[in-house]
Image (cartoon, rainbow, N blue to C red):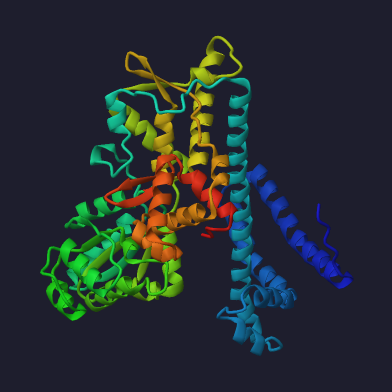
Amino acid sequence: MRHVRLSAQTSDQVLRSVRMILRYVFPVVVFLVLSERVVGRGYLYGVVVRFSWIGAFPILAVLIGRWRDGITDYYLRSYPEGKLRGPLEQNRERVGGFFLTVPAFGVVVSRMVRLYFSGTLTRFRQSRKALAFLFRRKLEKRARTEAPEDAPQLPEAIADAFTEGAAPPELRIAHYPELDDVVRTIEERRAAGRGAAIALVGEQGVGKTTWLDELARRVGGARREVGEARDTASALAELSRVLGAPRAETVDAFCETCGGGDQPIVLDECQNFFLRTVGGAEAFSVLADAISRTAPTRVWVCSFSRYAWEYARRVVDVDGVFARVVGLSPWSESAVNELIAHRMRVSGHTASYEDLIVDRVEGTEFESMVIRTGERYRQLLWDYADGLPRVAIHFWTRSLVPSGNGAVKVRLFADPGADELEGLSDDARFLLAAVVQHGSLRPGDAARVLNRPEGRCAAIFRQLASSGYIVEQDGRYAMTSHWNRAIVRFLRRKHLLYF
């Protein structure tokens, strides 16, 4: 336990403050107890309660006055850029400064409460992570997993229900953070003939595409996925293509063509306009210019991967382009559980956790143990996936073994051996970091980012793909769901990823 030493003067102030509070609270409490026993909680009891609250305000004023210097010092230390800093310093020794201490006291108390609950929540999350870790170790030590290294052959209904791509409406759950507010904002601005610029930011696999699909369904229009653009010409060509407009040669021409209209422009994968290299933000500058010019009358909603967005904030004034940024955080444990349960219902199959029970008992106790084991296993799954629904879905399907009659058994999933990544060359590590930071890359773009020959980058891409770390689609390479968390944790450990 940490001991805090107080000066004699401070100790005396604390004792005096405590005595004053007790001298007021004790008689009030005694009178309330006696009045309740004699006449019950009637009119007299209510009068005492109301007057006791009125009497609390003078005591609060005395306490604030007594601790005025301490409150002021704490506020100045904690909020060096606070709005009250100047007035507090100028009126510190004046009588009128007391009225400035009151709002400062409110700010200080709110900060202390926030820090307390933040610390409590952090300890709670860390406790759940620790429990998930211990549960996995217990399963590995005392129970033999029968889950094979390769994904088992699951019934077609389960495979269809647990697709890892953009899910159709019947496979979704109502998890769209801030979407209702965004839709309301868009409708209000459209009604007033005004536009808006909104950015959607989140990690790969957190549900950005599904969020945009739902937004487009509610406000009209369609989600459009943009391809890579590296300079002004390719950016204008790509924007013209996805919006179905004639190809524009200048930003002015593009704005004249697409600046009007009532339908919101919903763009996905806008990190494809960035490249982490010298001059790599040229294409985004075109997008930012087009948005800035047309946003007064046109609604733009653009999604970005988290790592590309954080980089862009350092090199481009993205905050000046987008008036609002919606950050998609990792899903809560309950949301991931709801998603899995919903898709299991859609598949028409039930899951049994009996094979995960280590200490078997009989009777009703066995049934409750099955329930607790299922809860612990889903907690383990959520913890390993870091709250990313795509990763959770991937490893859930790797946990299932068909048992017939519309049922599946749940076994401990085999997570990827992260030690394999330790043997990668420096170029391979840098290439993986570039893929994570950009979402996906072509060998030619990777050569610009790493300043390596394109042939060398292409060869490393093929090696990484053959090991299952990344997957190729239409010439672009991206992380697989299976290695997603292992690679991100590895890169952070090696200080190649900082966000």
Q: Nearer the viewer, residue 97 or 196?
A: 196
Location of residue 299 with respect to 357 vertically, above or below = below
Location of residue 10 with respect to 159 vertically, above or below = below
Classify residue 142 by image quadrant: top right
Q: Position of residue 403 (x, y in %)?
A: 38, 15
Q: How many marks?
A: 0
Q: Would residue 44 be found to the left or right of residue 255 on screen?
A: right
Residue reaching furthest top? Answer: 362
Location of residue 288 with respect to 406 vertically, above or below = below
Q: Residue at x 66, y 48 (%)?
A: 35
Classify residue 118 by image quadrant: bottom right
Classify residue 151 by image quadrant: top left
Q: Residue at x 54, y 55 (%)?
A: 426
Q: Would residue 231 be found to the left or right of residue 85 on screen?
A: left
Q: Nearer the viewer, residue 301 or 225?
A: 225
Q: Is residue 140 visible?
A: yes
Q: Residue at x 54, y 37 (%)?
A: 417
Q: Residue at x 75, y 75 (%)?
A: 66
Q: Would residue 450 be found to the left or right of residue 138 on screen?
A: left
Q: Position of residue 463 (x, y in %)?
A: 43, 45
Q: Is residue 309 visible?
A: no
Residue reaching furthest right? Answer: 8
Location of residue 97 with respect to 443 vertically, above or below = below
Q: Position of residue 285 (x, y in %)?
A: 32, 75
Q: Nearer the viewer, residue 468 or 454?
A: 454
Q: Would residue 256 be found to the left or right of residue 50 on screen?
A: left
Q: Nearer the viewer, residue 386 or 119?
A: 386
Q: Position of residue 268 (x, y in %)?
A: 28, 57
